[in-house]
């Protein structure tokens, strides 16, 4: 996911940059940033991890039914799959 952030440039807020939001490891499942509610570490319900262009992307929904996605490393993705917190999707 990409989120627009303003970065100061010579004292003014002129430039915009995109910040990559990564998945965070938790004890029970995958969490991500919710763009709709603008909250961090929202747990995903029934995540599915797909491999697209060499990236591991977990897609799922939050408790309100909003779609979410999070990008993670191969090791993190395999850890969530082996623990049963996520299912394998396409691209494996």
Image (cartoon, rainbow, N blue to C red):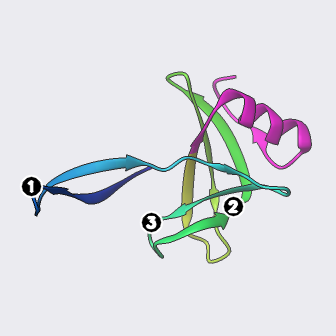
The secondary structure type at the circle numbered 3 is: loop
Q: Which residue is mark 1?
A: 10
What is the distance, in whole Å, between disc 3 and disc 1 at their CAs?
29 Å
* Residue 14 sits above or below residue 89 on the image: below
Q: Which residues are magenta?
A: 71-92
The circle on residue 44 is: 2
- Front in this rendered view, residue 28 or 62: 28
Q: Which residue is mark 3?
A: 35
At x 82%, y 36%, the residue is 79
Q: Which mark is first along the chain, 1 or 3?
A: 1
At x 49%, y 50%, the residue is 21
At x 29%, y 59%, the residue is 5
Q: Is residue 78 left or right of residue 20?
A: right
The secondary structure type at the circle numbered 1 is: loop
Q: Tags 3 and 1 in contact by the CB under 8 Å rule?
A: no
Q: Is residue 22 left or right of residue 76?
A: left
Quadrant of res 67: bottom right
Quadrant of res 13: bottom left
């Amino acid at each position: 996911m990409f989120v627009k952030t303003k970065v100061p440039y010579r004292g003014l807020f002129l430039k915009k940059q995109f910040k990559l939001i990564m998945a965070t490891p938790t004890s029970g499942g995958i969490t991500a940033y919710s763009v709709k509610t603008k909250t961090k570490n929202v747990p995903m319900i029934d995540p599915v991890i797909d491999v697209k262009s060499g990236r591991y992307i977990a897609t799922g929904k939050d408790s309100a039914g909003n779609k979410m996605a999070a990008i993670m490393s191969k090791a993190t993705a395999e850890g969530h799959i082996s623990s049963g917190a996520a299912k394998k999707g396409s691209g494996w």
